[in-house]
């Protein structure tokens, strides 16, 4: 006879937090959101910790290098999507690892043979008025000069004037050499009253620009997460099919942590993948696994060597797995069950394996609830897809700005490896949709609001760290009528009047 789990499957919207004693030290500025990313022996420190408990979803429409850079600068981590060729995924990882605050790879470049017309067109395209002039017109070609708005007069100069006749040539430029620090670069900028300092390598090839306006950028990101060599942290998604080629390429590119990306991780495929990675690399390569929704799944992947375990099936905003396959579990119930397994495992082995709540977080308070229910960090897709830094198009639809957001199981992503049940290489039916999400602006501004709310909620719960919240939170279930009571009710809202 089938096993019946008596407990009803529940989700975050069915719970609230009851305030705990807010002591005088429970103020938002005292709250630390630091959290472990990978497993560790109790009493020691994990190899990677995050400063905010957020990771971005392993999705084409979410985690490209631009979002990864911004999230790491703000204290979290991205997993670059794996549903792309190995070489392009490794290149995205490399781009994050190469990022140096204040050192910008030039996105506007021409050759001396181009014309003023080309300069004007490029400025229109990129919005940037500083143009690197290189021998081949690429960002890292041999630097031959620089063009800024001080070098030409649109009203007087002919549009077909060659760049070589009005650029500031190399021998008149002040340049820095690769290896200089941001503060050295800023000193040169200051001493010579420059707006832009080109940084070149020993063969005179352009490496970066440092702009005067970036002077203080490194001070703006106190939460930044980096490896000991001061490079930003970045993760990458892998699958259970091509891992023997993909993992070495990602490791070589500098990925700090990997994650097997699957809608259903309780499988022998994941076991084999984990074993292969651990046998080949030991603890030098850190790898998460999932997704699971109960204790059995957790113990299985813990046994196989997972460094963290992801929880959640079917709760994602773009996910229709529950409708299509009838598998899944309410995210809150799944998380509570897996958190118990994590604690039992720790009591038995002395090893703490962080768990990640993946998908279905809608309101900011859901994030605190998920942490209170035992999650160590949270994976989000919809939340990040709305920002400038996500890789998708911003469109205006019916006077509202939106960004595109599609599931990995949609026809558009064709990430069949994520839904693979063996057999031929193809997506047999869709488990995700293609959608829009409201455009929300810069990640940094949104994080400030979300994290501010989370800190305030934690203070109400009497907790200034995530472990304190997990230990002391009081959580209650809510009836459907008390959910109504929680919103504005029995008044006429002014904007609806
Ligand atoms: P959300 O944050 O609610 O948008 O959910 C994102 C999560 O949804 C991802 O991290 C992943 O686990 C899941 N996902 C991604 N694609 C699909 C799908 O096409 N069904 N689901």
Image (cartoon, rainbow, N blue to C red):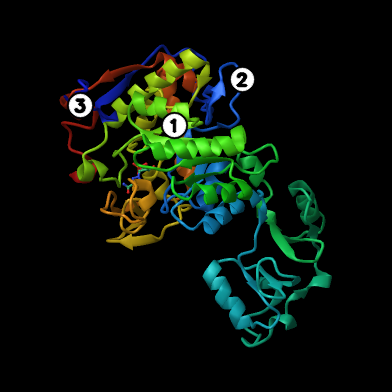
User: Looking at the image, is mark 3 or mark 2 earlier in the sequence?
Assistant: 2
Structural crowding at the residue carrying mark 3, measured as other residues with C-alpha within 10 Å and reported as few (<14), some (14–19) or many (≥20)? few
Instruction: Give the position of the N terminus as an image quadrant.
Output: top left
Q: Are marks 1 and 3 in contact (CB under 8 Å)?
A: no
Compared to residue 76, the image places residue 298 above or below, namely: above
Q: Which one is nearer the viewer's eye here, 322 or 449?
A: 322
Residue 367: image x %, image y %?
A: 39, 31
Which residue sits at x=61%, y=41%? Answer: 220
Q: Secondary structure at mark 3?
A: helix
Residue assigned mark 2: 44
Q: Earlier in the sequence, mark 1 or mark 3?
A: 1
Disc 3 and disc 2 in contact, CB within 8 angstroms: no
Report the mark closest to the observer, 1 or 3. Answer: 1
**Quadrant where the C terminus is found in the figure:** top left
Q: Can you tell which of label 3 and label 2 is closer to the viewer?
A: 2
**Quadrant of the rendered image containing residue 479:** top left
Q: Position of residue 127 (x, y in %)?
A: 55, 66
Decide if residue 241 is in sight here: yes
Q: Secondary structure at mark 2?
A: loop
Does any portion of residue 440 appear in the rendered image? Answer: no
| Residue wearing tag 1 | 309
Q: Answer with the quarter of the image where residue 17 lies.
A: top left
Q: Are marks 2 and 1 in contact (CB under 8 Å)?
A: no
Where is mark 3, residue-wise?
A: 485
Which residue is painted at 34% across and 47% down in the image? Answer: 422
N-terminal label among 2 and 1 = 2
Q: Is residue 189 above or below residue 489?
A: below
Residue 347 shown left or right of residue 192 in the figure: left
């Amino acid at each position: 006879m089938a096993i019946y789990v008596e407990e009803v499957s529940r989700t975050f919207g069915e719970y609230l937090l009851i305030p705990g004693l807010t002591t005088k030290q429970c103020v938002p500025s005292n709250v630390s959101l630091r959290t472990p990313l990978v497993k560790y022996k109790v009493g020691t420190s994990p190899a990677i910790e995050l400063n905010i408990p957020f990771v971005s979803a392993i999705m084409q429409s979410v985690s490209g290098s631009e979002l990864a850079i911004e999230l790491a600068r703000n204290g979290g981590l991205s997993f670059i999507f794996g549903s792309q060729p190995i070489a392009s995924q490794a290149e995205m990882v490399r781009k994050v690892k190469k990022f140096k605050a204040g050192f910008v790879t030039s996105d506007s470049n021409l050759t001396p043979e181009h014309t003023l017309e080309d300069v004007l067109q490029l400025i229109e395209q990129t919005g940037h008025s500083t143009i690197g002039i290189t021998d081949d017109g690429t960002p890292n070609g041999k630097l031959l000069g620089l063009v800024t708005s001080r070098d030409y007069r649109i009203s007087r100069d002919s549009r077909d004037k060659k760049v070589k006749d009005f650029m500031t040539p190399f021998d008149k430029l002040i340049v820095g050499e690769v290896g200089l620090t941001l503060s050295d670069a800023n000193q040169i900028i200051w001493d010579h009253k420059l707006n832009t300092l080109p940084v070149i390598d020993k063969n005179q090839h352009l490496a970066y620009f440092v702009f005067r306006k970036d002077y203080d950028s490194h001070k703006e990101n106190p939460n930044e997460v980096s490896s000991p060599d001061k490079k930003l942290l970045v993760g990458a998604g892998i699958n259970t099919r091509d891992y023997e080629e993909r993992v070495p390429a990602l490791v070589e590119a500098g990925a700090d942590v990997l994650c097997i990306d699957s809608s259903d991780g309780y499988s022998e495929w994941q076991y084999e993948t984990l074993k292969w990675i651990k046998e080949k690399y030991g603890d030098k390569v850190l790898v998460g696994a999932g997704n699971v929704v109960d204790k059995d799944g957790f113990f299985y992947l813990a046994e196989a060597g997972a460094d963290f375990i992801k929880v959640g099936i079917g709760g994602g905003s773009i996910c229709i797995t529950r409708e299509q396959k009838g598998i899944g579990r309410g995210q809150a119930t799944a998380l509570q069950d897996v958190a118990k397994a994590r604690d039992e495992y720790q009591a038995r082995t002395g090893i703490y394996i962080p768990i990640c709540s993946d998908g279905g977080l809608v309101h900011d308070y859901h994030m605190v609830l998920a942490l209170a229910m035992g999650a160590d960090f949270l994976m989000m897709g919809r939340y990040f897809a709305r920002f400038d830094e996500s890789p998708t198009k911003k469109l205006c639809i019916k006077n509202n700005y939106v960004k595109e957001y599609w599931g990995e199981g949609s026809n558009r992503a064709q990430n069949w490896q994520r839904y693979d049940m063996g057999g031929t290489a193809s997506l047999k039916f869709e488990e995700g949709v293609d959608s829009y999400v409201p455009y929300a602006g810069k990640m940094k501004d949104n994080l400030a609001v979300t994290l501010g709310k989370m800190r305030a909620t934690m203070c109400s719960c009497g907790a200034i760290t995530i472990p304190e919240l997990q230990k002391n939170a009081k959580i209650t279930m809510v009836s459907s009528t008390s959910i109504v009571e929680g919103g504005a009710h029995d008044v006429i809202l002014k904007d609806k009047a």
